[in-house]
Image (cartoon, coloured by chain):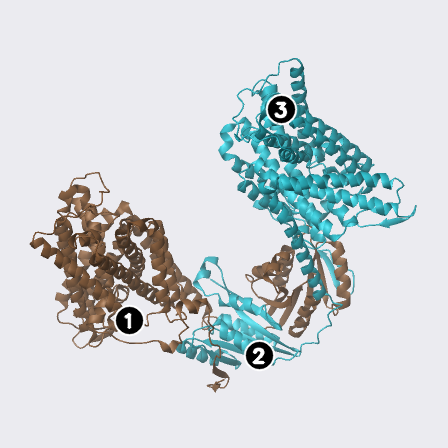
Chain colours: A cyan, B brown
Amino acid sequence: MNIKDTHSNIFEEMTEHTPRASLQTMLIGRPLATEEASHQTIGKLVGLAVFSSDAMSSVAYGPQEMMMILVAAGMGGLRMAFPIALAIAILLMILVFSYEQTIHAYPDGGGAYIVARDNLGELPSQTAAAALLTDYILTVAVSISSGVAQVVSAFPALYTYRVEIAVGMILLVMLINLRGTKESGITFAIPTYFFLILMFATVIMGFARLLTGTLGSVVNPPAFETNLLQPLSLFLILRAFANGTTSLTGVEAISNGITAFREPRAKNAGATLMWMAGILGSLLLGITFLSVHIGVVPVEGETVISQLTRTVYGNRNLLYLLTISATTVILMMAANTAFADFPRLGALVAADGYLPRQLSVRGSRLVFSRGIILLAAIASLLVIRFEASVSGLIPLYAIGVFLSFSLSQGGMAHRWWKSGHLKPGEEIVEQGSTLHYDKGWKHKMIINGLGSLCTAMVMIIFAVTKFKDGAWVVILLTPALVAFFFTIRRHYARLAKQLSLENNPRKGHIRRNRVIMPVSGVHSGTLIALRYARTISDDITAVHISIDAKETAKLEEKWEKWGEEYRLVVLKSPYRLFLEPLLDYIDKLCAVAGPTDIITIIVPQFIPKHWWTNFLHTRTAEALRKELLHRDNIVITEVPYQVE
Amino acid sequence: MNIKDTHSNIFEEMTEHTPRASLQTMLIGRPLATEEASHQTIGKLVGLAVFSSDAMSSVAYGPQEMMMILVAAGMGGLRMAFPIALAIAILLMILVFSYEQTIHAYPDGGGAYIVARDNLGELPSQTAAAALLTDYILTVAVSISSGVAQVVSAFPALYTYRVEIAVGMILLVMLINLRGTKESGITFAIPTYFFLILMFATVIMGFARLLTGTLGSVVNPPAFETNLLQPLSLFLILRAFANGTTSLTGVEAISNGITAFREPRAKNAGATLMWMAGILGSLLLGITFLSVHIGVVPVEGETVISQLTRTVYGNRNLLYLLTISATTVILMMAANTAFADFPRLGALVAADGYLPRQLSVRGSRLVFSRGIILLAAIASLLVIRFEASVSGLIPLYAIGVFLSFSLSQGGMAHRWWKSGHLKPGEEIVEQGSTLHYDKGWKHKMIINGLGSLCTAMVMIIFAVTKFKDGAWVVILLTPALVAFFFTIRRHYARLAKQLSLENNPRKGHIRRNRVIMPVSGVHSGTLIALRYARTISDDITAVHISIDAKETAKLEEKWEKWGEEYRLVVLKSPYRLFLEPLLDYIDKLCAVAGPTDIITIIVPQFIPKHWWTNFLHTRTAEALRKELLHRDNIVITEVPYQVE
């Protein structure tokens, strides 16, 4: 024991408790000490792998969901797919320039929540938090569902088990995250680059066969799921565009994770962002172009990636299987990213007092376990509710993403405006970054302002065109969440005020401690309680609720013998009630008690050795305790006595 | 307040608490004071109505279930129905003579449990208890299911709702019993005599039309449900007989309820028993004879009573509907009888310590509410499980009945043997009755012995022939229940020994009370707890589990200022565990504590005003309390502080 006397009466020592092995340690590993937290940094190549899985994996569902809308207007509709993909690529460019600026302005991490908190205030930042948390939940649900769709495309027999597989995958990712990511970046790099290589191989091979005229069309394409032919209206195009924008989910990831990069980290992170955008853009355009060309039929049963890959490689051969596996794995890694971000943001919001404090407590493996479990639970419920259908989940997805994009870029624009109004050399230290004069502020404000405007427009397009498909849920949920966050915050604030020592004058010393001891019988448990009662006060009253006159007579006789001449009050209860007369009696005592009086209720608590025997006893002590906890100036003392 | 000083230090007063109106009082009536219990007695005519509904209602399913077995051997099989009914009537006669003797020997109530307890010992009496409790549950399930079958026969459209109707009926009877039977015997007499008049009218009318040759056969008989024709084997006949014996369930009711009769009560009860047997026997024979004659098809869809009645009255006219209603009502009254008997027996067994004591506590309406609710719950589950099918439930039914018959009659036979070995004028006072020499003991012993033997044989026939249909459940369950009763008894016995003041030497006075106060922060709640701690001991140690060094430094500073120079021990917890290091610390203190030392743990219990805010706080105080309750020589004191 290592006792250190820091003050006159304060002793510090290290606990000798070491955690034991259990089912939990088997599943998620031995507990980690607080000081074991690691702080490694990564380069651009690994950084790309770590932070891009979410963005790049979106090509597995973005183009498909876009084409699914267009196909309602027949093959003519599908011809609009490439132009729409181009528009999305342009939007991506705007976003990337916007975020590049965020990275340099917030080298300590510039997530939408932090940027909105610094530059827009409480309400927008909590709105961003609500949007982001919703977004992370949907990232898990959508990515995993799309991953399962890839697996099912390769092995159609698994279709009936898709929900079970999806929930299983979520639980797997949850377990991995509960263990904590002590893994080096390499663990991420291998599957990400494996995916990139195979995906590019597919696209390049596709174009090569297209140019040589050997590509052809999808063999045995799946049957159309929609047979209702709609005209190619603007509304349809906008809906398709909205669905396609889900390809852009995840591009903000690098700006959240700047601290993980090697110095000069802003520069490295910025370069990585550019690379990621280039890759994402070319895959998006390439996949869309080839898919339309070979006549892919966008359906839930077989994914666009699967139809494209088997057409490019001739049939379901090894290369096909490798590509599908790589796609599934990258989608799981996208879910994994959300598992890192959700609990971290939850902890940040909780630390600010807008979410339950418990979310900011690190679990045995130094991760925010409660957030991880919460995310897995909600995402699983969503997957079950939507039967692992990507198309079913998509309408809930992108609103949160684009709302947070827009708030983040709007915050940045406001930041440049503030920066433009500083004197050169002047500095303002804000919670998330340090602000100083920037002479290019006008130019930068326009870029971020444009980003904010474009993403806000996308959000509105999405909300309007997908409203009745499910977007209404998110539109109602987000303000409800924000209101909830503020309610929580108000609770904590009031609590802090009530607990504050400065606000509350100290109460005077207690002068009189009246002890009330309910007794149902006089037995050794009663005497143990009485023995204790004597040590804390001389003013002891035993109270017996009399239901059966014979029993009471016996009790009175025993009390005469064993009660050490303490007072016994017998309350006759004609309606055979126990709790109510006792509480009435205590209330009467409370009513006459002075400010320096206190009443201690000593409850002899009967603790059976075997839990199953509990049902053999009326648990009145427990009920009494629960009632008394809510009364003022009453202390409850439980004297437990263990019995067989 | 009415204070009466009975002893030097014992004060008796009447509680002023009067129960309030609530949903409960609305449903089951205002609470009754203990002294409001009524003690009215009844004559033979009303006694027959009160105690015979169970027995007489069995004619609604006994003949039907017997014929259902026989019909498997075709119309030839059905010709055996009347001879079997005759055999059952003879068995009824034997039983009645047997029980007549019980009534005179046990004028204070001679149920199988009491008779077996007095004359056979602990194991047989508990076996009788298990058998009877099972029997009562099945009486409810079978009677209600048969009642629903009558309703469905009249209104076939209700067939799909039969389970819901049955559960609804059970709940209705439960509610009536929770209100308590303050009703006079007339409430029972009206529907019972209504049933008897209509049923005899049906049988007499049937014979009249038979003799005048106008009876004919069932018009539009239901389709046969069994199409597998079996030979008419002895096994089949025995199975049919076994099913038919369910008509005899309930004949013991009068012997349980002798105390309710007017003096001379044994004589009145005996006469009532004879009347009941006569009525039951004639109905059984009459219904069976007529049903076979008119070619009733015994199926679940339409009851035998329904087919017989509509044939006798020509069609589904008013008389038919009245008869069916009367049958339904009498079946509900049979269930009602079980609702009176089950809780009463449960209370008796509980008072003897073989069932949870709570079952012997009277509820707000002076009835054993817990037993009533338990019965309703189990019976409802059975009805749901067997989809209100009488045929499905029958195989579980009669074993318990005949086991208790046999034990009761066996006990009586042993009683006569004992009585024959007393000297004239000698008396033995037993728990249930007074035993004296009876010169007719040999004769009486033979009658009861025969009764015991016959019922034992019936039980064996039933167990063997219905084994695979479901009787095996009861054959396994009964000994399991008995074993369970003995386990409960052993628990109570050990407990009583441990609580006994004679066996346990008194502990010496407590010399030292060490107070440990876990603190997570220093706030007004902490100071309220510290204020209390000062009043009970000078030996106070605050213990803080340090998870975050910064937080701890702040806490130490505050303690310096507000801690009144009491000791603060800071336990550093590297694995961020809270409970375990604290428990380890307490364990260490316990290890060095002497026999006259006690440790008080003062837990500042945070009580939020609104329950919903609970989720915003880690409930460590609760977890700590639960762990500590199981440790010796530790007292837990909760100082609650109410906050917003």
User: Callout 1: residue from which chain?
Assistant: B
Q: Residues within 10 Å of mark 2 (few under 14, many from 20)?
A: few
Q: Nearer the viewer, mark 1 or mark 3?
A: 3
Indicate which disc residue A589 carries. Answer: 2
> In terms of secondary structure, where does tag 3 sit?
helix
**Residue visible at 72% across and 44% down?**
A37
Q: Earlier in the sequence, mark 3 or mark 2?
A: 3
A495 to A396, vertically: above or below: below
User: Is the C-beta separation of discs 1 and 3 under 8 Å?
Assistant: no
Disc 1 marks a residue whose amino acid type is Gln
Q: Which mark is residue A291?
A: 3
User: Can you see residue A339?
Assistant: no
Marks 3 and 2 sit apart, C-alpha to C-alpha, by: 82 Å
- Between tags 1 and 2, which lies in front? 2
Are labels 1 and 3 on one chain?
no
In the rendered view, tell whether residue B396 sits above or below residue B630.
above
Dot 1 falls on a residue whose secondary structure is: loop
Disc 3 versus disc 2: nearer the observer: 3
Q: Which residue is mark 1?
A: B431
Q: Are marks 1 and 2 on the same chain?
A: no
CB-based contact (under 8 Å), mark 1 and mark 2: no
The structure residue drawn at horizontal position 69% and vertical position 41%, both measured from the top left corner, is A402
Residue A359 location (% of width, % of height): 66, 51
Give x and y (percent) for residue B153: 26, 51
Report the quarter where the C terminus of chain B lies.
bottom right
Residue placed furthest toward the right: A424
Count the numbered circles shown. Answer: 3
Q: Chain of mark 2?
A: A
Amino acid beneath label 2:
Leu
Residue at (65% x, 68% y) in the render: B515
The percent position of residue B67, horizontal first and vertical second, equals: 19, 48
